[in-house]
Image (spheres, rainbow, N blue to C red):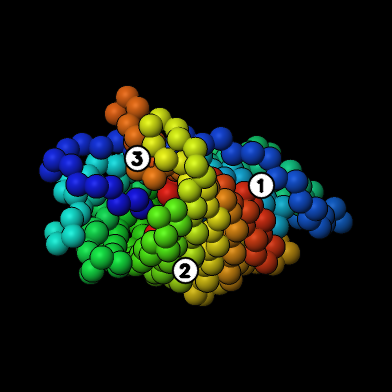
């Protein structure tokens, strides 16, 4: 989450992200010889990915998952060099899950899955010194699967740390690390899932020499790594479980050195990254370096 220069306290700030997910084409194995007859209630799905993966298009063992997420936030108190800051957030996500790649999945599902989620929460920003900031966070919300008529309660609790180093007048290096606890409970099927995410990342930025909206433009490259404890069980299928143990993301970004508001909406940064893990591929889209 970006740290902006202090403005007046209790000033509402809307930060909107409206991102279009692209198409990812990856060869995955098919299982046309398997033709089980099974009801939707016997098939275990996880919905918490909508909260932890953000906007993008992902492929997990033949399941194409597309997420579009808008993030609204209000800064109750700006962080200064000595004072703690607080921000209220309300990520709203729409998920589209198509399962046309595997024939045995077509037998289970006759339609695509469409979900909507909202995860309001709070983020605190605690300055440790000129370099380091601690960011405790918590979200609690719900999701709705309109195909299976399932309602899901979801929550995330975590702690992140961000360090910034200015290598020169035109170069900046950021390192982030943290841990998040994520879980869900499905009210109709009584299924539950919980896991821990250990994450770290590095972000390098350099001035381009160009100006946009009267702000200096910089370009960057970043690397993120997430490790799940225990392995994240995405689905429980007739041919076994689909699990993710770790995800690596490599991406690029383009942004303004200082945010600029247009119609009250801060314009700051855009990034795109490619994620990879076991049985997992995906393109993701976002704004600031996630730490």
Mark 1 and mark 3: Cα distance apart in space:
34 Å
Determine whether, in the image, residue 283 is placed left or right of residue 90.
right
Q: Nearer the viewer, mark 1 or mark 2?
A: 2
x, y (%) of residue 169? Answer: 40, 55
Mark found first going from the N terminus, 1 or 2: 1
Give residue 259's mark: 3
Label 1 SS:
strand
Determine whether, in the image, residue 118 is placed left or right of residue 224.
left
Q: Say which of 143 and 122 sits in front.
A: 122
Label 3 SS:
strand
Residue bearing the label numbered 2: 200
Q: Residue at x 27, y 55 (%)?
A: 123
Residue 153 higher or lower than 128, as above or below: above
Q: Say which of 85 and 149 sits in front.
A: 85
Q: Residue at x 63, y 54 (%)?
A: 274
Residue bearing the label numbered 1: 64
Q: Say which of 212 and 273 sits in front.
A: 212
Q: Residue at x 58, y 60 (%)?
A: 249
Mark 1 and mark 2: Cα distance apart in space:
26 Å
Quadrant location, the C terminus = bottom left
Q: Nearer the viewer, mark 3 or mark 2?
A: 3
Quadrant of the image occupied by residue 147? top right
Label 2 SS:
strand
Residue 258 higher or lower than 175, as above or below: above
Mark found first going from the N terminus, 1 or 3: 1
Mark found first going from the N terminus, 3 or 2: 2
x, y (%) of residue 93? Answer: 45, 41
x, y (%) of residue 19? Answer: 51, 36
Determine whether, in the image, residue 53 is placed left or right of residue 97.
left
């Amino acid at each position: 989450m970006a740290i902006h220069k202090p403005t007046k306290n209790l000033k509402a700030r809307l930060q909107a992200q409206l991102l279009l997910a692209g198409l990812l084409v990856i060869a995955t194995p098919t299982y046309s010889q398997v033709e089980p007859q099974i009801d939707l209630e016997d098939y275990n799905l996880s919905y918490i990915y909508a909260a932890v993966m953000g906007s993008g298009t992902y492929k997990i063992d033949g399941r194409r998952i597309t997420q579009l997420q808008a993030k609204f936030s209000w800064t109750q108190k700006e962080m200064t060099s000595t004072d703690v800051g607080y921000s209220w957030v309300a990520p709203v996500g729409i998920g589209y899950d198509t399962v046309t790649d595997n024939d045995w999945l077509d037998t289970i599902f006759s339609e695509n899955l469409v979900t909507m989620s909202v995860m309001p929460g709070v983020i605190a920003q605690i300055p440790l010194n000129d370099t380091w900031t601690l960011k405790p966070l918590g979200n609690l919300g719900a999701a709705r699967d309109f195909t299976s008529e399932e309602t899901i309660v979801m929550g995330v609790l975590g702690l992140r740390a961000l360090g910034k180093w200015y290598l020169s007048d035109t170069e900046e290096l950021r390192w982030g690390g943290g841990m998040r606890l994520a879980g869900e409970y499905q009210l109709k099927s009584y299924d539950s899932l919980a896991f821990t995410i250990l994450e770290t990342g590095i972000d390098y930025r350099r001035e381009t020499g160009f100006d946009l909206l009267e702000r200096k433009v910089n370009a960057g490259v970043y690397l993120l790594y997430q490790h799940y404890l225990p392995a994240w069980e995405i689905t429980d299928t007739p041919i076994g479980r689909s699990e993710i143990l770790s995800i690596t993301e490599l991406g690029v970004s383009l942004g303004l050195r200082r945010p600029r508001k247009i119609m009250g909406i801060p314009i700051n940064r855009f990034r795109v990254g490619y994620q990879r893990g076991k049985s997992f591929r995906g393109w993701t889209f976002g704004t600031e370096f996630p730490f």
